[in-house]
Image (cartoon, grey):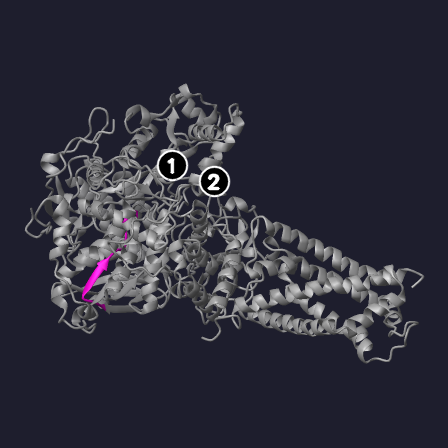
Amino acid sequence: MSSKLNSRIPEGPISEKWTKHKGTIPLVSPANKRRIDIIVVGTGLAGSSAAASLAELGYNVKAFCFQDSPRRAHSIAAQGGINAAKNYQNDGDSVFRLFYDTVKGGDYRSREANVHRLAEVSASIIDQCVAQGVPFARDYGGLLDNRSFGGVQVSRTFYAKGQTGQQLLLGAYSALERQVAKGRVKMYARHEMVDLVVVDGKARGIIARNLVTGELERHSAHAVIIASGGYGNVFYLSTNAMGSNVTAAWKAHKKGAFFANPCFTQIHPTCIPVSGESQSKLTLMSESLRNDGRIWVPASLEDAKAIREGRLKATDLTEEQRDYYLERRYPAFGNLVPRDVASRAAKERCDAGYGVNKTGEAVYLDFSAAIMRYGQEQANLKNMTNASEAEIRAMGTKVVESKYGNLFQMYEKITDENPYVTPMKIYPAVHYTMGGLWVDYNLMSTVPGLFVAGEANFSDHGANRLGASALMQGLADGYFVLPYTVGTFLADDIRTGSISTDLPEFAEAEAAAKARLEGFLNANGSTPVEVFHRRLGKIVWDKIGMARSESGLKTAIEEIRALREEFYRDVKVLGGMFEMNPELDKANRVADFMELAELMALDALTRNESCGGHFREEYQSEEGEALRQDEEFAFVSAWEFTDNDPGKATLHKEDLVFDNVKLVTRSYK
Amino acid sequence: MNLTLKVWRQKSAQDAGKFETYQVSDISPDMSFLEMMDVLNEQLISKGTESVVFDHDCREGICGMCSMFINGEAHGPDRGVTTCQLHMRKFKDGDTITVEPWRAKAFPVVRDLMVDRSAFDRVIQAGGYISVNTMGNLPDANATPIEKHDADAAFDAATCIGCGACVATCKNASAMLFVSAKVSQFALLPQGQVEATDRVRNMVQQMDLEGFGNCTNTGACEVECPKGISIENIARMNREYLKASITA
Amino acid sequence: MASQRGLFGTSLARKYWMALTGLFLITFLVIHLLGNLSIIFGTGEDFNAYAAFMTSFPPIKIVSYLLYASIVLHAVDGIVLARQNMAARPVNYGSYNGAANAGWASRNMALLGIFTLLFILVHMKSFWYEMHFGELGLDANGNKDLFTLTVTAFDQVWYTAFYVIAMIALGFHLWHGFQSAFQTMGWTHPTYTPIVQFVGRAFAVVVCGAFALIPLYVLISPNV
């Protein structure tokens, strides 16, 4: 293991590590907490919950988000649910099983201790959210309802229709606003972190751009928490929000924080397919739909061609003419295989010519069987012994509507097709990034005082995240981990006193940020930022997307470097520096994506194996399944920014030790 | 499709602002309204004109950031959608489309089509929460069963995305639907009833302070609400406030 | 502003008073209409007896003061609310399609209310003032002959036209106002609210229609 990486995993059996660690973390007394300032960047699940919880404890918190309100962070878009090892369904769930499923689902590339802690605190998250008034779905007995998600064989997912992320975020947001009202949190909306300030080797503040006035502001603190989400927008088209960006994390990386596993990106299998050139983003259809939807393509190439050309409709095909390829390939898990497996299987079918829309990149997600099954259930409940098919269908449609109504409505609005009647068309799209800033067990990066939470860190999901685990991790980090672990760093800071923003480090960081932004304005080029972003996205999707190869990655690196050079020369940003200027903000974000993209390619190139979301064409079985190389690659790649060039980053390896889970080939057959 | 756009341009909150007319061509009916605006902006930038500023983020109808008043209606002519989910197939080739920012005293224009909705955050700060700290040993989530109808109604109220379409569309710029949705969510849950009296009084007071108008019960808000939040919530808040005023 | 929390001053409190006074005025309309119908179905003396009763019976007198207060409160409160509402949107939309999402009556309550108020003033000058302070002759029973005054007024086409238009305005006002009052008070229910809405609209049409019918009857009928 690299000497620069110390994961600080506590000693002892895995199930006792966290309890023991909590008991030994140095505490900061309430009176001293009032003398300590903490900056939280990002107000999604991790950021909001961390900011609120730290403020409750007594720290002075400054929270930043680029949106107009903390409630808009992209956690809000998570649909399906949140996992917790409550075992309310009495189906054999436990903390260990959640831990095990997560390590296995992550294809054995995550840190056991972190994952176990996540599983341990998962139950508390549900208690906390219910106490906050989060309206989870309930059954007729008034108790909480659960559903099942990909990659697991129990029902442990709590949900609020298709808006679970929204409801959880609003819970955290209301806790945050309560602290804002008390004056414990100072909220800076429409502010974007443009640099990290490091003083004497410790993270002591940030430079933020006020997006309304354009001013660069200096903010100091004793510790900085980055909870700014993932970097999926490096692909241009993704399910991320338009504003989601890597800038906060990337700036921290350039200031010394190692970036871990950047090539681990998740392609979500069920998104609405791309419809045209001017498309700006992709819309996810929740994984929960795979509970009831069956995925298929036509069994014959002729039928697929006929469907693409509009000569045949999906409903014209009989059962025998359909290929339910997930059920065929993975009988044990069927349509509920993990996301990486489902995505690759869809790509495989479409590449083979079985795609069902004009672009040839879509498969069906069909609810007709579920509608009839639920309809029959209702008929039985109502003692309708000879209900007609239409009656059964109508009743079943109602059940499906009550479960997924808002998703179906969203689908219909976007595609103008009624998914209750014709099967949905879906295709994989970039959704989540498992990689992120490297953190130790305390969620602290390699820059002392810089903590990283939620999707922005790399910690819990290995090479592939299971559905409904992102919400769990965000809230675990914010509510139940950071409030304890920040003490490990801050206990030494009770006598530091407030950090001055007049320190030369602040002045330097501000000047550098200003020079960089002015650089975009003064480039006087001819091409809008959006065009560069789109071109970058195409390179990344084609060559660092669902399938990667050595030659493709090498080409990608060359292309990215050339594009980056062209960008600085030819970007066109109108308007001024000290005014609202979204184009300038976008240029600043895209510039960072261009550097990150190269590191992603480098990471993918270095990792000569296929695992989770990282699929190297050279490493697959004869059946096309991923081939891990545990002997050589059971480590976390942590990249240090060196030589002021993302392509010359230095690799540090954190070896992964599996004491509790045996490494086996992941099989969902 | 070829379209004529009348777009409100306003440099800053202090600036007076006026409509500018632009032409866009080759718009696909499958584009969302915001993608059409992207096309306009790319076109403007190439010509050396600053792009039209508007709020947007998730582009899947849940973040509540997008906020355009299109042809006299909040989020345009379609129902149950935000502007980002409004598709150009709802318009005809050759149409003239008027695009304005939300207009309310409580929502000052920041720039062009972007407004400041921090008034909503302040209303939430006044009481849109349950006063529970982060605790590792709260009662088990299943300790208090909640009747499914109440849980579902609380959920329906809680789906508010805070976009402000209700204020924008209301002839009085009233925020009653927004405030009542939050009051209702908590009033329907046992956890929320503990603080119900103070919550409704404080939130209503803050709503008034922000300069929103009064409710005439026209029902326009529920028609335009992208999440279909019912004015039954307004009635519930009226009850809650009456009860709070009489008993407190 | 801190004191404006309870049943006075806040937006919700002002609306409660609008609703309560409105509902009270609605009940008065029924009494008023029943008396007026004696113009069609009774004799002039019946009508005069009704008018005399209304102006002299002590309990009615008390109620009438409540009525005047309600009219004043409803009007003043309404004007305050309307002014606040206008202030809540200082810059108007260039294009506003109100018809897309709300009924015409609900969007014009203030206008309809002001017109109704104007009508009440004219109406009270014509009849109430004359009854109380004017020089009216006596009928066969010794009651003030309001009937003759009424018939004379309604035989003028312009007066009847004004009266009928005012009743249409009031009708629209009630079309929305009746059920709106219930919503404002929070008296809603999945089963009963549709009934309230129906009754409210039926009330608006029937009562205002009947009010309007009387002057038309007087104008057209050769006998009165």
Q: Residue at x 81, y 64 (%)?
A: C36
CB of mark 1 within 8 Å of CB of mark 2? no
Q: Amino acid at mark 2?
A: Glu
Mark 2 falls within which chain?
Answer: A
Of all residues shown, which one is farthest toward the top? A320
Mark 1 falls within which chain?
Answer: A
In the image, A524 versus A574, the foreground residue is A574
Q: CA distance from mark 1 to mark 2?
A: 15 Å
In the rendered image, residue A346, in percent from the top left (x then y), is placed at 33, 31
Dot label at residue A289: 1
Residue C203 sits above or below residue C69 on the image: above
Question: Is A512 one of the magenta-colored residues?
Answer: no
Q: Secondary structure at mark 2?
A: helix
Crowdedness near tag 2: few (<14), some (14–19) or many (≥20) residues, C-alpha within 10 Å: some
Residue A199 sits above or below residue B38 on the image: below
Task: Please check whether the numbered discs 1 and 2 fall on a single chain.
Answer: yes
In the rendered image, residue A251, in percent from the top left (x then y), is placed at 22, 58
Picture quarter containing residue C182? bottom right
Q: Which residue is mark 2?
A: A412
Magenta range: A220-232
- Can I make out residue A528 in this image? no
Crowdedness near tag 1: few (<14), some (14–19) or many (≥20) residues, C-alpha within 10 Å: many
Q: Residue at x 58, y 48 (%)?
A: C191
Picture quarter containing residue A528? bottom left
**Quadrant occupied by the C terminus of chain A:** top left
| Upstream in sequence: badge 1 or badge 2 | 1
